[in-house]
Amino acid sequence: MDLFDDLPEPTQTAGASVKEVQSCPSEEFRGEKRKHDCGPKDEVLEDKAEDKKVCKELARLRGYVAARRGEREEMQDAHVLLPDMSNCLSSLPSQVSRLGYFAVFDGHGGARASQFAAENLHHTLASKFPKSNADNLDKLIKKCLLDTFRQTDDDFLKKASSQKPAWKDGSTATCMLVVDNVLYVANLGDSRAVLCRSEEGDEGCEKKCVTLALSKEHNPTIYEERIRIQRAGGTVRDGRVLGVLEVSRSIGDGQYKRCGVISTPDLRRCQLTPSDQFVILACDGLFKVFSPEEAIAYVRNVLQDVAVEQKEGQTEEEARFEAACQRLASEAVRRGCADNVTVILVSVGF
């Protein structure tokens, strides 16, 4: 059994596979080169293998964010955009050229859990990320993500319980770690991540767009989640844990941890390809009024809009993605979503 829920491979089209080419990371993600001390024998081997060395052609990723308070009195969402988080680490495995991080946190019962996760989770992730070369990098990244979520939850609960009165905040989490051209998505709760990918249509037809789920929803009405809660001595009433909490996995929510609410994320891995267009990460405020397919279609329509205003210093593509992100969040509010709405739109280009 694989370590992750892998997403399907794209339909093979001309030039659709990620090629190994003699190129270096784009300026947007360029970091310091990692140096290794080698003896004379190593130098000879390196000289002989010089022609065989190649770098991966890294996808160009740009992140855009839009946040709306809706009808709530307080903004309880938080978000993080780190297209290049290499400065958070002391070192990286030499086979890794780029590390990026994008995350959405949807707080409930207050904004403290979501803010804590936004401020701390990526630092914990950086401290636990593999430091040296390894053949089993996927396995190490999985362990890193699981340990990071557990420690972030433990750290917040420790802080929350030390307050008087104790904090009762909780938060969902949908975090996308980008390792070169591979997406690792870890999520808790009902915030989501979806990918727009072009697939070859029937013979003679144009390419079609497919929506791939990069996350898994956790609520107590799902059979596996409900069984775990009941075995822990909790109950599910009106689709909520103890009739109150809408999600079955979260950071924080200390009063529900004894009832089977856990902080173990689901993990999914996806290899980026030239067929990929963009990723949407958003809290449930968006998906209460948009299906994933509708959200993808809405963004694509805006990207084709010739009337998008271009700000100084922006390329036309950047202006379109910025407009798509802002309009998507505003449209969720216009459609009647009273909840906080936070949308991160990540463009993908090769």
Image (cartoon, helix red, strand yellow):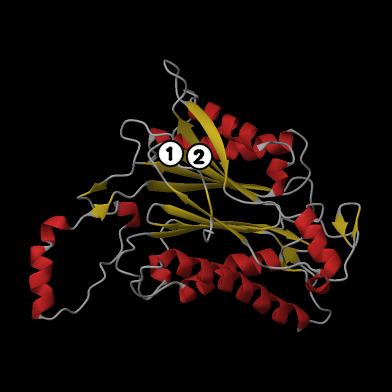
Can see residue 140?
Answer: yes
Q: Which amino acid does label 2 sit on?
A: Glu
Image x and y of residue 18, in percent: 33, 44
Q: Quadrant of the C terminus?
A: top left
**Is the residue 295 above or below the residue 138 in the image?**
above
Up-down relation of residue 94 to residue 312 (above or below): below
Q: Where is residue 13 in the image (x, y as percent from the top left)?
A: 36, 31
Q: Which residue extends farthest front?
A: 1
Circle 1 is placed at which residue position? 318
Q: Which of 173 and 210 is in front in this view?
A: 210
In this image, 225 relative to 199: left or right? Answer: right
Return the residue nearer the eye: 186 or 344: 186
Looking at the rendered structure, the secondary structure element under dot 2 is helix
Quadrant showing the N terminus: bottom right
Q: In which quarter of the image is residue 137?
A: bottom left
> Which image quarter: residue 135?
bottom left
**Circle 2/circle 1 CB separation < 8 Å:** yes
Q: Residue 104 at what x, y percent from top left?
A: 61, 55
Q: Mark 2 points at which residue?
A: 322
Q: Residue furthest top?
A: 204
Q: Nearer the viewer, residue 291 or 76?
A: 291
Q: How crowded is mark 2: few (under 14 residues within 10 Å), some or many (20 or more)?
A: many
